[in-house]
Amino acid sequence: GRGYAGIVAADVLQHTERDAAIASGIVALATRLDASVIAEGIETKKQLNLARKWGAAECQGFLFDAARSGEAFARRIVK
């Protein structure tokens, strides 16, 4: 079956090239194992572009919208 792998882009971009190499390797391995990779903590376009370059299937973070409670999310969806 398909699995899930999360990678936190905000953390990776604040560290070294070695950290980025490890993270991109994890994404490649997860993809090869047919896991869906979600890049979490996307706050900038640079992070989004990096996640896309690595092959993350989905991205989430403040670049797209702020965190909300379940009630606030439901109200937004109903609008």
Image: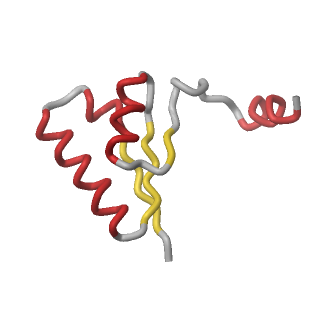
Looking at the picture, how far across and down is residue 73, in whole percent? 75, 33
Asked if residue 68 is positioned above or below residue 40 in the image, the reply reads: above
Query: In the depicted view, which residue is nearer to us: 46 or 10?
Result: 46
Residue sitting at x 44%, y 24%: 43
**Image quarter hosting the C terminus:** top right
Q: Residue at x 43, y 64 (%)?
A: 35
Q: Is residue 1 above or below residue 23?
A: below
Q: Residue furthest front?
A: 53
Of the pair 39 and 54, the residue shown nearer to us: 54
Where's residue 55, x and y in %?
A: 38, 49
Q: Is residue 53 left or right of residue 1?
A: left
The picture quadrant where one finds residue 18 is top left
**Residue 78 horizontal/vertical position (percent):** 87, 34
Residue 22: where, in percent of width, then height? 18, 48
Model colouring: secondary structure
Q: Residue at x 42, y 22 (%)?
A: 44
Compared across the picture, whether 30 is left or right of 75 comes to left
Decide which of 54, 61 is in the foreground and name it. Answer: 54
Count of all numbered marks drawn on residues in the image: 0
* Side of 22 where 49 appears, left or right: right
In the rendered image, the residue lying farthest to the right is 79
Residue for point 51% across, 31% down: 61
Q: Residue furthest bottom?
A: 1
